[in-house]
Image (tube, rainbow, N blue to C red):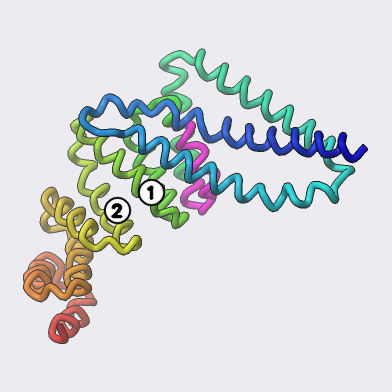
Amino acid sequence: MPTLISIILIIICLLVILTIVIKKFPALAILDVNNIPGQKETRFKENIMKARLERDLARWGNIFMKIKNLVGRRLGFFKSLHIKLKTLADHYKKSKKLSLSERQERVRILLTEADEDTKNENLNSAETKLIEIIRLDNQNLKAFRDLGDVYYLAKKYHEAKQTLEYALKLAANLKEDKAKPEINFVLAEINQDLGDLEASLNYIREALEFEANNPRYLDLLLELSIIKKDKNSAVATLAKLEEVNPENNKLEEWQNRINSL
C-alpha cells in the first residue's frame, strides 16, 4: 500500500509539473525572435521560461509536502489534473484552426480583458491573457508592452526588463517609433529599481531623444542626476524642467537637493 501511494504521489507531482510546463511554454515558444537579426534572442525565451518555471515549481513544492496528509483528496486532484490537461490540449488544438479574422477578434477581446484585469490589479489573469495574445500574434507590440508593465507592477523586474527589451527591438523591427520613448522610459524605471543607474540613464536619455520636453522623462533624468551626484547634468535638467513645467511642485525641493551636492 505505501508503494502504491508513493507511485500515485509521484504521478501527481509529474502531472502538476507537466501542467505548469504546458501552461507556460506554448506562448513563449512561438516568439519569432529570429526575425530580428544580430541578436541571440532565444535567451529571452529561455530566461523568462526558466524564471517562471522555477517560481511556479517552488510554489508547488510546499503543496507536495502536504499531499501525504490529504489521502481523501488525492484521487480527486488526479482526476482534475487529467481534465485540465485535456482541456489545455483541446484549447491549443482548436486555436491553431482559427481563421485570421477569428484570431484578430480573439486578440481584440483578450486585450480589452487584460486591460481590465490590470486596472483591477488581477495581474496573474492579465499575464495569462497577454501571453495568449502573443501566442496568437507574436508581432503584437501592445501585448509585449502591456506584459512588461504587468511584470513591472508585480515587481518581477527581471522579467519586465527582458520583455520590454524585446518590445523595444520589435518596435524597431516594425518601425513603430512612436512606441519607443515610453518603452525606454519604463526600462529606465526598471533599471533604477534594479540598481543599474547607468543603464537607467541610458534609457531615459534615449527617451528624451524622441520627446525632449516630456516632464516625466525630465523628472526621472533629474532624479538620476542627483543620485549620481552629477551636478552639471542636474542643473541643466532642472533649468529645462522649469522651462517646460513651471508649475511642478518639486522644483524648490530639487533645487535644494542640487545645492547640497
117 magenta-colored: yes
Which image quadrant for residue 47? top left
Give the main secondary structure of the magenta stretch: helix
Give left or right: position of 258 versus 39.
left
> Quick check: can you spot residue 108?
no
Q: Which mark is residue 186?
A: 2
Count of numbered circles in the view:
2
Q: Which mark is residue 160?
A: 1
> What's the residue at 44%, 36% (across, down)?
111
Residue lying at the far front of the rendered structure? 3
Amino acid, disc 2: Val
> What's the residue at 52%, 19% (across, down)?
95
Identify whether 31 is placed above or below 253: above
Nearer-the-camera pick, 55 or 176: 55
Nearer-the-camera pick, 211 or 157: 157
The stretch of residues the image draws in magenta is: 116-132
> Quick check: can you spot residue 192?
yes
Give left or right: position of 17 versus 200.
right
